Amino acid sequence: MAVKIALTGNPNSGKTTLFNALTGSNQFVGNWPGVTVEKKEGKLKGYQEVSIIDLPGIYSLSPYTLEEVVSRNYLISERPDAILNIVDGTNIERNLYLSTQIMELGIPVIMAVNMVDVLEKTGDVIHIDKLAKKLGCEVVTISALKGKGIREAADKAVKLAEKKRAAVPVHEFHQEVEQAISSVEDLLGGEIPEEQKRFFAIKLLEKDEKILEQMKAVPDISKLIKELEDRFDDDTESIITNERYEYISSILGECVKKGRKEKLTAS
Ligand code: GDP
Ligand code: K
Ligand code: MG
């Protein structure tokens, strides 16, 4: 059974280092159609039929940059069987912003917290079991540079991909935001696959213009948006962004313990 695994993450989280280590010389490098953004695909070493794609580094699934457009379109249209989300463990707060959105795509996700070699030096501790519970996905630690934990991460991603089972995100927004999301989901026709409805509904509420281009039938949700904006006295994009950051700080408070050594060097 052929499976496809996509590497996603912020720029400089270590995706290409991991990609190179996992694929060796079995790589095909080109450009994404119509744009000069590099496309790298390769075969996972040790497997016959597992391909890995190194997606352009991004900070968000709101498509403001060319890289975001390419990565997002790939995830929505090509639907990899699993996502290996690479997170820079030394910069976890910023990295999790993208992760919260990736979890909404309905695609199975495994998170690899990278740069553990650096964390060992700074003394930062990330409780991956708690993190996994909070995020609703499996979490492993790796050092892409040193090759530590990468085989296990890849094997777990393959297992997840082979299940071909849609993922269900655990994070819930404020109750009234959730109600609006469900209302939008109900308005989406059969054109959008069931497991992608939440992602599309959230993007529509965020007034994401580019998502409209991908839909044949666009529901009118202006009334739902106005109700939310009146209720929260803010625009819907900010409401959703703010809630993501609140969710992330609640996760960090429980899952990350900053080391002493970093504080010493910072002063
Ligand atoms: P990408 O932008 O996500 O593809 O990131 P790269 O793979 O290009 O890595 C960005 C930088 O981080 C490079 O200088 C890598 O050598 C370095 N790097 C990647 N993984 C690790 C790691 O596990 N530990 C350390 N110390 N550095 C890493
Ligand atoms: K880079
Ligand atoms: Mg790269």
Image: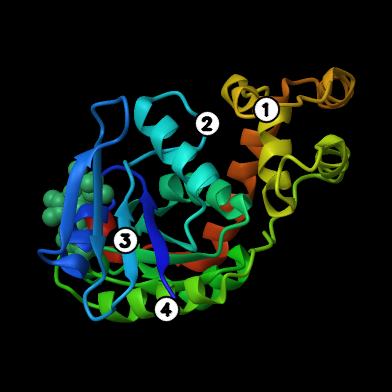
Circle nearer the N terminus (4, 2): 2
Asked which colour scheme the image uses, the reply is rainbow
Circle nearer the N terminus (4, 1): 4
Q: Which quadrant holds residue 37?
A: top left
Assess disc 2: are there few (<14), some (14-19) or many (≥20) residues with their C-alpha within 10 Å of its C-alpha. some
Assess disc 1: are there few (<14), some (14-19) or many (≥20) residues with their C-alpha within 10 Å of its C-alpha. some
Looking at the rendered structure, the number of numbered marks drawn on it comes to: 4
Marks 2 and 3, how far apart at CA: 23 Å
Residue 139 in view, yes or no: yes
Q: Residue at x 41, y 75 (%)?
A: 158
Of badges 4 and 1, the one in the foreground is 4
Residue 52, numbered circle: 3
Question: Which one is nearer the viewer's eye here, 217 or 55?
Answer: 217
Secondary structure type for disc 4? helix
Residue 79 location in percent, x, y?
52, 52
Of the 4 image quadrants, the one containing the N terminus is bottom left
